[in-house]
Amino acid sequence: MNINIALFGIAREIVGQSSLTLDAPAGQSAAGLLADLRRTYPELAGLRSLAVAVNNEYAADDVVLHERDEIALIPPVSGG
């Protein structure tokens, strides 16, 4: 299945673009997606946290992704 991923902040800088389309296996979980992305983009593994949002809600690791889901990678946010 093809999934579209929006990237924000430092994740966007690491990947070099604001969105990705990936071919993922059916039944791919949010944790599995993160593991795949960290293998492809090792600098992502250096982030102290990286959240996956699915359909505008933070997703638990075991959430199964579907082709039409709106998926976003949200890195740690700092500010003042």
Image (tube, rainbow, N blue to C red):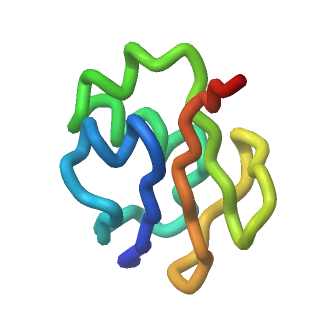
Q: Residue furthest bottom?
A: 68
Name the quadrant of the C terminus: top right
Residue under the point 73% across and 54% down: 63
Q: Residue 47: give x, y in percent of width and height.
A: 46, 19
Number of numbered labels in the structure image? 0
Identify which residue, 77 or 59, lies in the foreground.
77
Residue 31 or residue 51, whichever sits in front: 51
Q: Residue at x 22, y 37 (%)?
A: 40
Asked whether, in this view, residue 47 is left or right of residue 19, the answer is right
Q: Is residue 23 above or below residue 49?
A: below
Residue drawn at (53%, 49%) of the image: 73
State whether residue 22 is above or below residue 9. below
| Place of residue 13 in the rendered image (x, y in percent of width and height, measured from the top left) | 28, 41
Residue 78 quadrant: top right
The quarter of the picture where the N terminus appears is: bottom left
Residue drawn at (34%, 41%), measured in percent from left and top?
37
Q: Is residue 73 left or right of residue 23?
A: right
Q: Identify whether 39 is placed above or below 71.
A: above
Q: In the rendering, at what x and y percent does residue 24 appear?
A: 37, 63
Asked whether, in this view, residue 22 is left or right of residue 1, the answer is: left
